[in-house]
Amino acid sequence: MSRNTAPATPRQLHLNVNILHSGFVPSAWRLADADPRAFVDVNHYVRVARIAEAGKLDAVFLADNAAIVDQIDFRPITALEPTVLLASIAAATTHIGVIGTASTSYNEPYNIARRFATLDHVSNGRAGWNVVTTADLASARNFGRDAVPDHAQRYERAAEFTELVKALWDSWEDDAFVGDKAGGRFVDVSKVHPVAHRGRHFDVQGPLNLPRSPQGHPVLVQAGGSPDGRDLAARHAEAVFSASQSFEESAAYRRDLNTRAAAYGRPGVKVLAGLTTIIGATEAEALRRRDELVDQIPWRYSLNRLAGTLGIDAERLKLDQPLPDDLALPGGANGNHTFFHATLAQGRRHGYTVRELIRSLAGGTGHRVIVGTPEQIADDIAHWFNGGAADGFNLMPDALPDGLQDFVDGVVPILQKRGLFRTGYEGATLREHLGLARPDNARLWRKSA
Amino acid sequence: MSRNTAPATPRQLHLNVNILHSGFVPSAWRLADADPRAFVDVNHYVRVARIAEAGKLDAVFLADNAAIVDQIDFRPITALEPTVLLASIAAATTHIGVIGTASTSYNEPYNIARRFATLDHVSNGRAGWNVVTTADLASARNFGRDAVPDHAQRYERAAEFTELVKALWDSWEDDAFVGDKAGGRFVDVSKVHPVAHRGRHFDVQGPLNLPRSPQGHPVLVQAGGSPDGRDLAARHAEAVFSASQSFEESAAYRRDLNTRAAAYGRPGVKVLAGLTTIIGATEAEALRRRDELVDQIPWRYSLNRLAGTLGIDAERLKLDQPLPDDLALPGGANGNHTFFHATLAQGRRHGYTVRELIRSLAGGTGHRVIVGTPEQIADDIAHWFNGGAADGFNLMPDALPDGLQDFVDGVVPILQKRGLFRTGYEGATLREHLGLARPDNARLWRKSA
């Protein structure tokens, strides 16, 4: 397990795929080849992961909600629990990383530390945890609350939660396990430590009941766009999933995040920009595919979804007029900053009508959508990567598995030819794919301090 | 998915294997062929599960603790989190059931409902949940508590928790998913219901964010020996893991449990008696294996372990004297009834010295140990099964994988020859293996009531 961050080798592009069930576009399940039941079919996820692995991608990623937070009458939702599903995927793959989402608001630190460490053990060092604080009311109501906890309080809990999880991951020193058959000594208990955490949100004694995992810490990923979210990412995240509609915004976000991380004495955080791809052999073919998909999304769905992101009644949106002028972050500081701002920016920048905005978003969230040929998409990726707007991309293909297959067959070879992307896995762990050091055990640091 | 409980077919023996890391005997990891690191090696668990599947066993089972509750200087512990590990096992097998333990005291009902439903989806209907309330202080201290919650309170919470999990599993009617591509209708939302639970311990709105799982409900398993535990099992469990040292005790336990279940209008609960097997080609060979294993357990370990089960200081145990006379359930009604009573009964019945008792328990808990040839073990199993002392067995082979391999190669064919055990899987789901009906959706019951 390499400890090198490989500072001398050229910057490496990172590609991750979000297996968002049938695909990013809400109507993906209606395509001729699609199986509507894919969202609960483990074989579908395994198939997508194998395509991603054939394309030498860094990782697959599973978003998550602990509630129904979209309109299931019209489209699939995140349903299967990520850690269990990722264990199934890990069993069917050998190299690709497996990153899952879990909420700090509705879990216990000991359980999360253990589940992700277990995923790291069973995948031989390929696990990552996407730390989310969960901003929706439906989730809150599934965990004994009448309202979403305050934004600042959610992030305060998340910070303590993440610190504590890392301490639990470090509660066994790397060489605590002995396994000396002749001497009858299984573990050197002097190297297994309680964490004895007494905090504002949690009291946890520890130690964890399993040895330090192959990566030391599963990779920590975050996706916060708010100041609190950026601060949490700067303190703990090794990669972030971002959502920016423009090169300039993304570059500014990346600079800000790295400045914040440096203030904590940390190396740079990998910015993986959200990117939906709609691919065709020609641009016209790609546009036709986009329109075919968007035309199968009921307008009622898209209007409700857009209204939800913007925090207004759907009646206020007129298909052939621009967005209303008086929009403010829904729930004030408690809202989901990332998608509100990205969606608003997209609407304002181009002066789009609501209809045009929805089409440009492929009916989805505020993630950026590129419609084009493999060459056009590779050019765009190279531009963002070389210009410092991103360290890589969190791909959200329009439809799965075929949208990813097209990416792997069409875009990846171009990126490889340009020397931007690996042609084979060089490392074994997700950390190695991402060029991240294996963290030393915090206890060792404390002793040497 | 059959709805028949098959009342006309002859009673079927059920066999389950507890993959207790390196095996039941605390020194199993020291055997010549053993890999001490097996307890955190997914390939070890997969290997054992494949042997179990080759033997047509009903299920593999993973016990669990959310803390270090044994002496890790001397032996392995339950380490990897069960649902994640079982997903790995399910991916590598096709028929065998996968049953995992999760605590109602240190989890949220929504999360547990979702994880086990997910496991049921990814295993195509092979999941089971072993409901435990967790009686140890070390676990309590990992979840913000200074003391173990009171026994009655733990069971009250467990009852509400289990009810609520079942309601969440029923929150989607079986035909709620539509997937009509042409009509654009994904889910019939009129068939997806909130649970709107407002209870003493939990407020959960629901619905669950995934469709009803292949088995309707993952199989519910329980292991309580106390009156509260038996009551919980009678109300909810479809199978129990029991621990009795004698035929008579086990038969009485099974009668009591079925009487209690009948009072709730429920069919019988399958009693799967804990059974450790130490197998040899001759009885003398089996005894040698037993002694070889026991002699490699440090006495200090065994004395501490026995003292812990009995709730006394280890200094009070003298190797060549019988157990002290004045033993009482540790922690009063809060203690672990099952193993205290089983261990005490074993010591008293035979008038064993402490040394003899530890040897007869193979250094372990209060589970029954048989040492003998495949014929002797098959005879014992047949006697218990035919005489109504058990519906099957939760096997805890002395060492894994070889102790299970010996059972599958030696004991299973004898049981099959006698018509007691299946020669092939007839069903696809764990419910079908166990002869359990697929539960109707509770909402349908309510409508028709």
Image: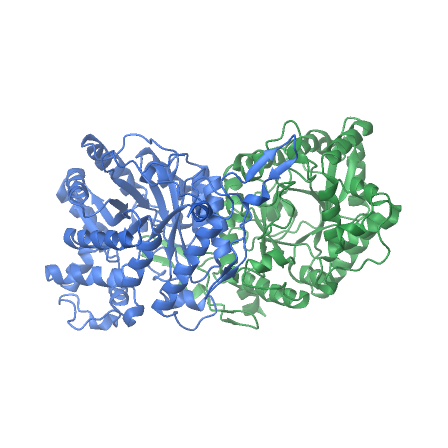
Chain colours: A green, B blue
In the image: residue B418, left or right of residue A108: left
Depth check: B222 or B28 in front?
B222
Whether A195 is drawn above or below B110: the answer is below
In the image: residue B311, left or right of residue A33: left
View extreme (left): residue: B351
Give percent across and percent down for residue B274.
25, 50
Give percent across and percent down for residue A302.
74, 44
Specify the quadrant of the image occupied by residue B132. Answer: bottom left
Say whether residue B25 is visible. Answer: no
View extreme (front): residue: B449
Depth check: A31 or A258 in front?
A31
Depth check: B156 or B36 in front?
B156
Say whether residue A417 is visible. Answer: yes
Q: Quadrant of the N terminus of chain B?
A: top left
Whether B39 is drawn above or below B156: the answer is above
Give percent across and percent down for residue B120.
45, 42
What is the total number of numbered labels drawn onto the structure image? 0
Depth check: B168 or A88 in front?
B168
Specify the quadrant of the image occupied by residue B42. Answer: top left
In the image: residue B131, left or right of residue B144: left
Give percent across and percent down for residue A72.
62, 44
